[in-house]
Image (tube, grey):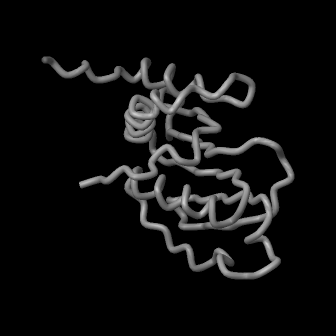
């Protein structure tokens, strides 16, 4: 049995474009292809910024750490108030992470959307300059990387 052919960059963009706030969420059966597509566009862009909209800081933190590992980032998350009772930790949260600068912050989030936004940026106009998401918070849960 032959393995499926790898995605082209155009296929990766199309796959990721299906994840938006207006369309019904694609099913978890598409997660494998979505993971492959995201890793491809990240590899073809110069830098990325992650935005995470979650029901709680702990849920957002979990998504941040799994996405960071999958995309090859090391996160110093000491700035996140993960154990503060009654603070941001217990409310809907927006986390923004810039892997290039290492800046990370969390704030209350009043919006209804949940998921991860990945802004891929390139130094040139010919490169990838797109925002993808809201991707599933659990897209990389249980996935191990070598």
| In the depicted structure, whether residue 87 falls above or below residue 101 | below
| Quadrant into which the N terminus falls | top left
Q: Which residue occupies the extreme right position in the image?
A: 110
| Quadrant into which the C terminus falls | bottom left
| Residue 74 percent across, percent down from the top left | 42, 66
On screen, residue 16 versus residue 106, left or right, reads: left
Name the residue located 53 percent from the left edge and 47 percent from the top edge.
138
| In the depicted structure, whether residue 11 falls above or below residue 145 | above
| Residue 13 percent across, percent down from the top left | 49, 24
Name the residue located 67 percent from the left edge and 59 percent from the top edge.
95
On screen, residue 133 versus residue 85, left or right, reads: left
Q: How many marks?
A: 0
| Residue 108 percent across, percent down from the top left | 81, 62
| In the depicted structure, whether residue 116 falls above or below residue 87 | above
On screen, residue 70 versus residue 24, left or right, reads: left
On screen, residue 105 versus residue 63, left or right, reads: right
Of residues 22 and 45, the one drawn nearer to the viewer in this rendering: 22
Of residues 76 and 143, the one drawn nearer to the viewer in this rendering: 143
> What is the quadrant of residue 2 in the picture?
top left
Name the residue located 49 percent from the left edge and 48 percent from the top edge.
47
């Amino acid at each position: 049995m032959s393995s499926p052919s790898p995605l082209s960059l155009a296929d990766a963009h199309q796959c990721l474009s299906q994840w938006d706030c207006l369309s019904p969420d694609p099913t978890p059966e598409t997660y494998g292809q979505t993971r492959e597509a995201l890793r491809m566009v990240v590899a073809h862009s110069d830098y990325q910024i992650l935005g995470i909209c979650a029901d709680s800081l702990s849920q957002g933190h979990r998504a941040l750490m799994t996405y960071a590992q999958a995309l090859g980032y090391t996160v110093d998350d000491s700035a996140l108030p993960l154990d503060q009772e009654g603070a941001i930790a217990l409310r809907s949260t927006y986390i923004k992470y810039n892997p290039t600068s290492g800046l990370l912050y969390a704030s209350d989030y009043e919006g209804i959307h949940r998921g991860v936004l990945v802004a891929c940026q390139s130094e040139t106009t010919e490169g990838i300059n797109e925002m993808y998401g809201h991707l599933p918070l659990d897209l990389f849960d249980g996935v191990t990387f070598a």
